[in-house]
Image (cartoon, rainbow, N blue to C red):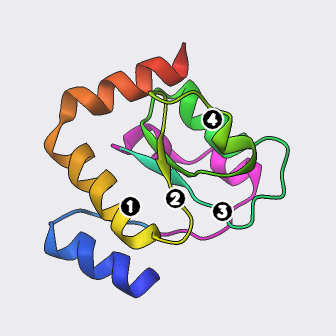
Amino acid sequence: MVLELSRLANSLRVNLLISGEIDDETLAHAVAVAAADAMSCLRWPSLEGGSASVIESMLYRKPKMVTDTGFYAEIPNGCVMKIAHGDEVANIRSALEQLCSEPERREQLGERAYR
């Protein structure tokens, strides 16, 4: 998955950083959050009742991709881009292409999630 997404990002000239799992303190102090154009909170299976990373990205008004399951599935459509489990690569590619080509959509997603 990492290799395929990295190749795709490289072909689209997208600076992709895959950090893997990070703790809440690292996320809270990450300069990358403020500088990011978009974020992903993709987890399978989703075992949590909430997500500090998705809430943090909402506070920063960042558009985000989430796995369409559990807590993430309950986030209203129009606030996040939901990625279906089972066809992640195609869904992530489509979401990244939209976020890249539609800057106004990035802003709208981030603003709706913030509100």
Q: Residue flagged by tag 3: what amino acid is it?
A: Arg
In the image: residue 97, left or right of residue 28 = left
The range drawn in magenta is: 18-37
Dot 3: element? loop
In the image: residue 70, left or right of residue 59 = right
Mark 1 lies on residue = 91
Mark 4 lies on residue = 56
Residue occupying the point 20% across, 33% down: 103
Can the viewer see residue 33 in this picture?
Answer: yes
Q: Residue flagged by tag 2: what amino acid is it?
A: Ala
Question: What is the C-alpha distance between the residues marked 4 and 3?
Answer: 16 Å
Do the residues bearing badges 2 and 1 touch, measured as CB atoms within 8 Å? yes
First in residue order: circle 2 vs circle 1: 2
Where in the figure is residue 96, as x and y percent of width and height? 29, 55
Q: Is residue 2 above or below residue 57?
A: below
Question: What is the C-alpha distance between the residues marked 2 and 1?
Answer: 7 Å
First in residue order: circle 1 vs circle 3: 3
Q: Residue flagged by tag 1: what amino acid is it?
A: Asn
Q: Residues within 10 Å of mark 4 (few under 14, many from 20)?
A: some
Can the viewer see residue 28 in this picture?
Answer: no
Q: Is residue 36 magenta?
A: yes
